[in-house]
Image (cartoon, rainbow, N blue to C red):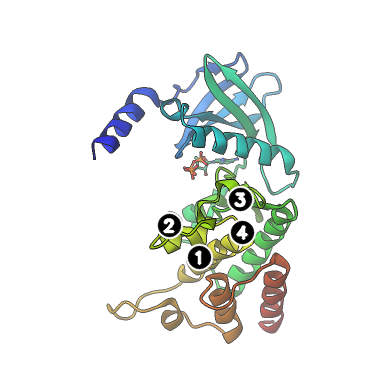
């Protein structure tokens, strides 16, 4: 309780975002603060040298003494600079300015699925939802082919711009062999199972998140008919193959181990619904 209070106080004092118009490193003018995550503050900025708009991420000052914060910041930088895919923001540069740590990346001027579903109340037909999942899987296949697990494939981190899907936010991404930081590898009795399913450094954690992602899309067109809470399998009318796919993604049935297996099943599903 006291610890939480002190952390909140530190955040208020140290993590005040830079004001719009501030120039960072003689180069980046802050246009807006896009948000504050667990370890970073994210800005939309304009680079004076080329006039390009880009995203600038700052390590949270209140947390810069924590090893895990440095690790996450370094990981995101390393992973983004390694990946080179048109649907993943490209890494720009990293630097220290006035004692603050920063890096830049490409700005995706699109909308997140969180905004589409909850702000724009967009409704996705089941077939469109599976086509979107298929597009996301191509990006995930690329990420996994570099032995990287994203570990945060949620609706706020999947975007669409002009009909093209993008995956952002690699703050929790890890290399598959980075087992030293995988707390879920050790015996953890009574540990939060949900957290393990989402965060274990294994390909199947990304599939688990995609199980939830597809459910968000499918539920966008759902109107409850009774007040009694039911499971997604009772509420959503889905073909058997779709239900089986989601059950495996959510690890309710034996999980998928490789993205190609998921792609195969989604392709079959799309083919059968033609
Ligand atoms: N490359 C990008 N292009 C466009 N918007 C981005 C980009 N990166 C981040 N954002 C947006 O900036 C905001 C803050 O993102 P950020 O990843 O720093 O934190 P978060 O997702 O809120 O928290 P956490 O990192 O703890 O998950 C989000 O609204 C996100 O959509």
Tell which circle, 4 or 3, labels the residue nearer the N-terminal end: 3
| Left or right, 220 with reference to 129 | left
Q: CA distance from mark 1 to mark 4?
A: 17 Å
x and y, in percent, of residue 142 in the image: 73, 55
Q: Earlier in the sequence, mark 2 or mark 3?
A: 2
Report helix, strand or loop for mark 4.
loop
Occupied quadrant, residue 104: top right
Task: Identify the disc placed on residue 212.
Answer: 1
| Dot 3: element | helix
Crowding near the residue tagged with mark 1, few <14, some 14–19, many ≥20 C-alpha atoms within 10 Å: some
Q: Nearer the viewer, mark 4 or mark 2?
A: 4
Q: Position of residue 138 (x, y in %)?
A: 71, 60
Q: Is mark 1 within 8 Å of ligand 1?
A: no
Give the distance between the C-alpha atoms of the residues marked 3 and 1, in whole angstroms.
25 Å
Q: Observer-nearest residue: 65 or 45?
A: 65
Q: Secondary structure at mark 2?
A: helix
Residue 88 visible from this viewpoint: yes
**Mark 3 or 1, closer to the camera:** 3
Q: Are marks 4 and 3 in contact (CB under 8 Å)?
A: no
Number of callouts in the render?
Answer: 4
- Cα distance, mark 4 to mark 3? 10 Å
Q: Earlier in the sequence, mark 3 or mark 1?
A: 3
Instruction: Tell me the residue that label 2 is attached to.
Output: 118
Which residue is drawn at the image coordinates 36% and 79% (left, top)? 230
Dot 3 corresponds to which residue? Answer: 179
Q: Residue at x 45, y 58 (%)?
A: 195
Rounded to the nearest angstrom, the CA distance separating label 4 from label 2 is: 30 Å
Disc 2 vs disc 1: Cβ atoms closer than 8 Å? no
Dot 2 or dot 1: first in sequence order is 2
Q: Nearer the viewer, residue 28 or 141?
A: 141
Q: Residues within 10 Å of mark 3 (few under 14, many from 20)?
A: some
Q: What residue is disc 4 on?
A: 202
């Amino acid at each position: 309780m006291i610890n939480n209070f002190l952390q909140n106080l530190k955040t208020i004092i140290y993590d005040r975002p830079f004001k719009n118009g501030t120039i960072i490193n003689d180069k980046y003018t802050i246009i807006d603060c896009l948000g504050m995550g667990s370890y970073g503050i994210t800005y939309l900025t304009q680079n004076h040298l080329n006039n390009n708009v880009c995203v600038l991420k700052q390590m949270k000052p209140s947390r810069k003494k924590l090893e895990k914060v440095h690790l996450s910041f370094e990981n995101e930088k390393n992973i983004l600079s390694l990946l080179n895919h048109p649907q993943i923001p490209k890494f720009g540069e990293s630097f220290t300015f006035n004692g603050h740590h920063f890096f830049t990346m490409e700005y995706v001027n699109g909308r997140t699925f969180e905004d589409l579903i909850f702000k724009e109340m967009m409704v996705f037909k089941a077939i469109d939802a599976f086509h979107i999942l298929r597009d996301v899987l191509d990006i995930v296949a690329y990420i996994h082919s570099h032995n990287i697990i994203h570990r945060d494939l949620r609706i706020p981190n999947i975007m669409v711009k002009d009909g093209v899907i993008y995956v952002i936010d690699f703050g929790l991404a890890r290399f598959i062999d980075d087992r030293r930081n995988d707390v879920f590898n050790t015996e953890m009795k009574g540990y939060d199972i949900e957290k393990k399913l989402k965060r274990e450094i294994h390909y199947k954690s990304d599939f688990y998140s995609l199980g939830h992602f597809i459910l968000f899309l499918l539920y966008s067109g759902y109107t409850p008919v009774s007040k009694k809470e039911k499971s997604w399998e009772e509420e959503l009318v889905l073909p058997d193959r779709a239900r089986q796919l989601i059950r495996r993604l959510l690890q309710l049935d034996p999980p998928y181990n490789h993205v190609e297996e998921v792609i195969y099943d989604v392709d079959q599903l799309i083919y059968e619904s033609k």
